[in-house]
Amino acid sequence: MVRYSRYAHTFDLGDDVALYHSLRMKPVYLNKKAYEDLQAWLAGPFCNDYDDAPENIKNEVNELVKYKILNYSEEDDDKVLQFVRSRVPGPAINVCYMITSEQCNLACKYCFLGNNDACKRSNFSLENMSIETADKAVDFFIKQIKLSGMDFEDNKPAIIFYGGEPLVNYDVLVHIAEKINSLRDVEKCVKHLEMSMVSNGLLLTEERALKLKELGVSIAISIDGFTEEANTMRVDVAGNNVFNKILKTLDMCKRIGVDVSLSVTLSEETIKDTKDILRLVDSYGVKSFGFNIMMSDENFIVPQEYNEKASQFILDEFVELRKRGIYEDRIMRKLKSFTKSQVYFSDCAATGGGQIVIAPNGQVGICHGCLHNKQYFVTTVDDEEFDATKHKDFIEWSQLTPINKDECQDCPALGICGGGCPINAMHLKKGNTIHDLDERFCTHSKMTLDFLIRDLYRIIKEG
């Protein structure tokens, strides 16, 4: 008997309907009459074979069969899932978070690293990364890239300078960038390596900004909106608001011609007004954005209604930003997956098995969210025998994709989700582990898929 796949989902578009397979990811749009005729045929006694479809819906049935939305049995669904799961990649290191310093000059109230918590903050090392450790860190990362076996000509590995606040240890940051640039002609695997820095901007001087531009280190400044109210959670260690100081940094970068992107954490105040971010864009000529949904921990619990509002805010901003030709990273990741009909296995380099984090003392871990306690920091840059592709923790993290989770199989957004943050998942409920769901992303992914299907429908109708 012809039946709907268990991965088939229906979206009511008013006059029309979209049918969508969450793993094949090709929406098929039908008018309501065709959909009703399809429902009647599937409910009747004459649907033993695809060829039994009435003439008036044969074309629709052929499309639905083509994209696996209709099939014959559970076995057909099992084959699709088995095929997709066989494509889940193992560890292949391509991203390195260089933690040049664990110290930060801010103590943002939502900080997922723990700078807002006196106990966690006391665990952060007071010693910055040394030149010697930095050299070993670069060599260690290069070795892990090579062990991953990627095509060096097409591959674009990345070093992200992070903290703490990376500019606390500016000289070592520069040393690492200069070393990478000196190796581009002799180490094929770093020929196309990209470098970036995520900073609060308070220690960024004109001289430093120009030097980073010269070295090819792109700059992302953290800010939560274009009003002081939106930035009330972004404070220094004494609890003072730093918004006006960040604006001075943005003014300086604009004046000297250094482009910056923005890393915007969506506080509850930020998401009240979409126009504030657009004012920020227009004032400083920002070309790219990354929106960050706040995370929960023992001291900061995000309410459920926030997740929906934050997700809607990102979608509303995306619509406005694309009119300006501005790249917003979080939606674009899912949009690329949707338009190419390619399952998005991981929304995070750590859960994709593609990331290492190197602490100032040379410890090497998987996720920078564990800096305060060094959980999942499994080796050091002195370990010449280490191979992330074979290490049990890196293998475990690389398999955290929703594709492998039974509780995700019924979700329409299964193919575009990529999962959320394992660290946030651990903190959501007592007893949780990295294998539990980051429920922020359940909301975000479902709302994003609904938007993408309706947006494509709009484009088709207009076209």
Image (cartoon, rainbow, N blue to C red):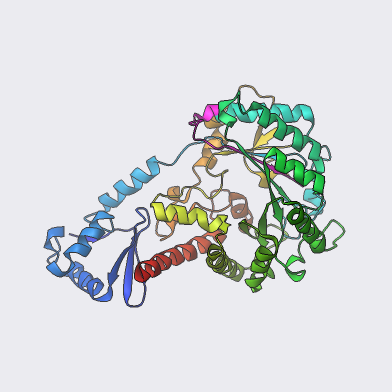
**Name of the residue lying farthest toward the right:** 238
- Report x, y in % for residue 136: 70, 26
Residue in the picture at 54% in, 53% down:
436
In this picture, residue 36 sits left or right of residue 217: left
> Where's the N terminus, which quadrant?
bottom left
Residue 442 drawn above or below residue 75: below
Residue in the picture at 20% in, 67% down:
42
Write down the quadrant of residue 295 in the picture.
bottom right
In this picture, residue 256 sits left or right of residue 27: right
Towards the viewer: 334 or 53: 334
Characterize the magenta stretch by its predominant secondary structure: loop
Decide if residue 317 is in sight here.
yes
Q: Number of callouts in the render? A: 0
Decide if residue 415 is in sight here.
no
- Report x, y in % for residue 302: 65, 65
- Report x, y in % for residue 61: 21, 62
Residue 163 drawn in magenta? yes
Residues in magenta, as a range: 146-165
**Name of the residue lying farthest toward the front:** 256
Write down the quadrant of residue 214 in the picture.
top right
Residue 390 drawn above or below residue 419: above
Residue 302 drawn in magenta? no
> Where's the C terminus, which quadrant?
bottom left
Residue 35 drawn above or below residue 160: below
- Report x, y in % for residue 274: 62, 71
In this picture, residue 252 sits left or right of residue 60: right
